[in-house]
Amino acid sequence: MMDKPLVLAIDLGTQSARAMIFDNEGELLCKVKLAYPPHISLKRGWAEQLAETYFDTMAAACKELPAELTKKIRAVSVTTFRDTMVNLGADLKPLRPVIIWLDERRAECKKPLPFLTRTVMKLIGMHEAVEVQRRVTKSNWIKENEPEIWQKTEKYVMISGYINYRLTGVLVDSSASQIGHIPIDNKNDKWQTKSALLYPMFDIPPEKMLPLVPPGQKLGAITAEAAALTGIPEGVPVIACGSDKGCETLGTGCIDARSASLSFGTSATIQFCTQKYVEPLQFMPCYPALIPGKFNPEIQIYRGFWMLNWFVNEFAAKEKAEAEALGIPPEELLNRKMAEIPPGSDGLLLQPYWAPSLKTPEGKGAVIGFSDAHTRIHLYRATLEGLGYALIEGMKTMEKRARTRIETLTVSGGGAQSDIICQLAADMFGLPVYRVQTYETSGLGAAMTAFYGIGIYVDMYAAASAMVHRREPFLPDSAVHAVYKRIYEEVYLKLYPRVRPLYSTIRRHMKESIK
């Protein structure tokens, strides 16, 4: 019996790098996961890391893979977290640490947007939202605070482009990886021209960006230098991949508009696959899918399941100690205790807008319904339910805009490993929730792209059919879903419009107090 073909999928997450070898039936044969050193935080809310750290950690993870498998791999694909850019100088070496996507610094943007852009945005009620996104664009902060760095920047590339360059010596990246605050025209798969309406938000000259190719195409091959650092054989092709969320969507088999992918990771998202370009919200871009020519509309809840880490660190010292004694993660113990709280958290409800977005530019959270009967476990459950309500709202918005109906859900990310959370999702959405054979779905999607790129599969649909194996679904409890449906419609949807003016007042008072 002939050996099955193997590929190496490299997944750079926000906190760790994973090197994984898959076969062409979707079996994860081995995995090495290494955490990065703590990120650099020169000021509160700042988050930076050396670009070299990401490559070095990834290379170390690859070197720990079994040599007898590594020597058999036929291709490599790299998926990374999003919205994190590298300033490369004329020698194509990093000029400064990268500003990680979760960094909270803001540019001042004193120079107004062009008259036409301002006028159009005001007419459609998006002026404030666009200004918020302009201020969170990290290149704008660099231009204001480190103009000498920006002047020396020869190329401004995604972390994926930097990693691929270090592996191949060729500065080119996948169009499906270009997700962030950059002037990309996703609909037409090219960089925006200077005449584009929203180009002034970023104002990055096209010549500073790198060439793009569709996912599945060969970017280059492992160089002798990269081979020595990683243990990957020299000459192995590196295949254009896509972002981590796009890989998760593909890796769970969401290849049409009837199935949506829930990502329970540091950032919580809901995403599906469409034939046409459909903005999930007006002027919010629709991302390129890993299936060439298709798109992934997405709604993102910033700092999604990161909120659970925050909860553990701030409120769950007792559970952390108990979990350590039991030899389990604190989240698992909290999930068990949460299951004893009734749906709706005994009237406690959380709105998870902890960072600004296009739809919620004020970007604050709220918790209502407190009473002396509530415990920190109630707050933990209310946090999970709040994330669920926000994702439901996102799904319904995208269904309406795409004129489709989601029939099934898939789950990825750390939270997807919990049966309790998967059942909670099924009950809240009122839909079947599926897991696949591995929770490393981003790596699986990257492996599928690699196999397609070297011709093992004729297209991504064939790769999904052969490599994605869904398990028995979590089915919704109709009575529990009815409870959540009432809370969602009668309370949750009414909360933000009513507290939004208060958020504006809070923001004004904060600015005045700083002065």
Image (spheres, rainbow, N blue to C red):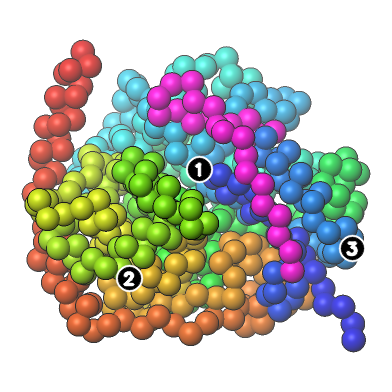
Q: Which residue is mark 3?
A: 68
Residue 296 percent location from the top left of the image: 47, 64
Question: The residue under label 1 is which amino acid type?
Answer: Asp
Does 352 lie within the magenta span?
no
- Disc 2 versus disc 3: distance between alpha carbons? 42 Å
Using the image, determine if residue 206 lies above or below residue 480. Answer: above
Give the mark nearer the N terminus: 1 vs 2. 1
Front residue (pair 34, 358): 34
In the picture, the disc for residue 21 is none
- Disc 1 versus disc 2: distance between alpha carbons? 30 Å
Q: Residue at x 49, y 51 (%)?
A: 324
Give the mark nearer the N terminus: 3 vs 1. 3
Depth check, mark 1 against mark 2: the one in front is 2
Label 1 SS: loop
Q: Which residue is mark 1?
A: 83
Give the mark nearer the N terminus: 2 vs 3. 3
Look at the image and give the residue range highlighted in magenta: 29-52
**Quarter of the image where one finds residue 271:** bottom left
Quadrant placement of the N terminus? bottom right
Sort mark 1 into few (<14), some (14-19) or many (20+) by Cα contacts within 10 Å: many
Regarding residue 390, the answer to whether it shows in the image is no
Q: Which residue is mark 2?
A: 424
Q: Residue at x 45, y 50 (%)?
A: 266
Question: The residue under label 3 is which amino acid type?
Answer: Glu
Q: Residue at x 72, y 25 (%)?
A: 90
Quadrant placement of the C terminus? top left
